[in-house]
Image (cartoon, helix red, strand yellow):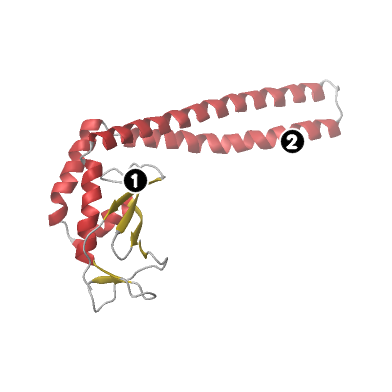
Amino acid sequence: LAFCSCGQKMYVPSNTPKYVCYKCRNKMPIADLETVFQEPLKDFYFSPTEILSYLEQADTTIKVKQELLSTLEAEQKKVQQEMDKVYRLFMGDQISAEGFGRQYRPLEERFKQLDDQLPRLLAEVDFLKIQYLSKDEIFAEARDLYSRWPQLEPEEKRKIVENITDKILIGKDEVTIHLFYLPSPSELVTSGQRNLTGSSPQRA
């Protein structure tokens, strides 16, 4: 997740507690990076504006998917009606077998596509509804996470950082943290990015 401002990925060698860029030798102590990361974490989880934005975008995401679900269901119904119409024409000897195949096959393929797509989309909507926490729950979980952060084990912190962070850019005098948008304390809900920037003095 950590990248140098020169574009190279940074690593933590076994003999030093620092992120190191092997190309330009830029360095960042792990402890300093942890301190920088904690500030945008606090800004997001303790900001009423950010929490409300989270709720609004989560609600919008659900509505958009529900509208798409309704549109696809309506299309599937229309396709089924067209298939029935073509079949009746064929059974009434109003079109040839060749004409029937030419008109029926594309409709059948589209119906199958919709039949595969609709259950997946419905499952997504149901999942988002389950994950759509109330404002009070989000505040409570966020504050609990932030208050426990200093006591978490390094492995626990690493997992949280990986779950909600897209990329960390480490420069000579500044660290830019790209968080996924809508990170809940427990998991990532949706995609997109939000840029949060912090800085701390770096030791050589």
- Describe the element under mark 2 as helix, strand or loop: helix
Q: Position of residue 125 (x, y in %)?
A: 42, 33
Q: Of 60 and 177, which appears nearest the observer?
A: 177
Residue 186: quadrant of the picture: top left
Specify whether 153 is left or right of 94: left
Q: Of 151 and 34, which appears nearest the observer?
A: 34
User: Cα distance, mark 2 to mark 1?
Assistant: 41 Å
Q: Position of residue 176 (x, y in %)?
A: 32, 56
Q: Which numbered marker is on residue 105?
A: 2
Specify whether 179 is left or right of 66: left
- Describe the element under mark 1 as helix, strand or loop: loop
- Dividing the image into 4 quarters, which one contains the N terminus? bottom left
Residue 17: quadrant of the picture: bottom left
Nearer to us: label 2 or label 1: 1
Vertical placement of 118 versus 201: above or below? Answer: above
Q: Residues within 10 Å of mark 1 (few under 14, many from 20)?
A: some
Residue at 81% x, 30% y is: 100
Q: List the residue tagged with mark 1.
A: 188
Disc 1 residue type (three-letter):
Leu
- Dividing the image into 4 quarters, which one contains the C terminus? bottom left
- The answer to whether residue 155 is visible is no
Q: Position of residue 154 (x, y in %)?
A: 20, 62
Vertical placement of 62 versus 177: above or below? Answer: above
Residue at 55% x, 37% y is: 117
Residue at 80% x, 22% y is: 89
Specify whether 164 is left or right of 17: right
Q: Which numbered marker is on residue 44?
A: none
Disc 2 residue type (three-letter):
Arg
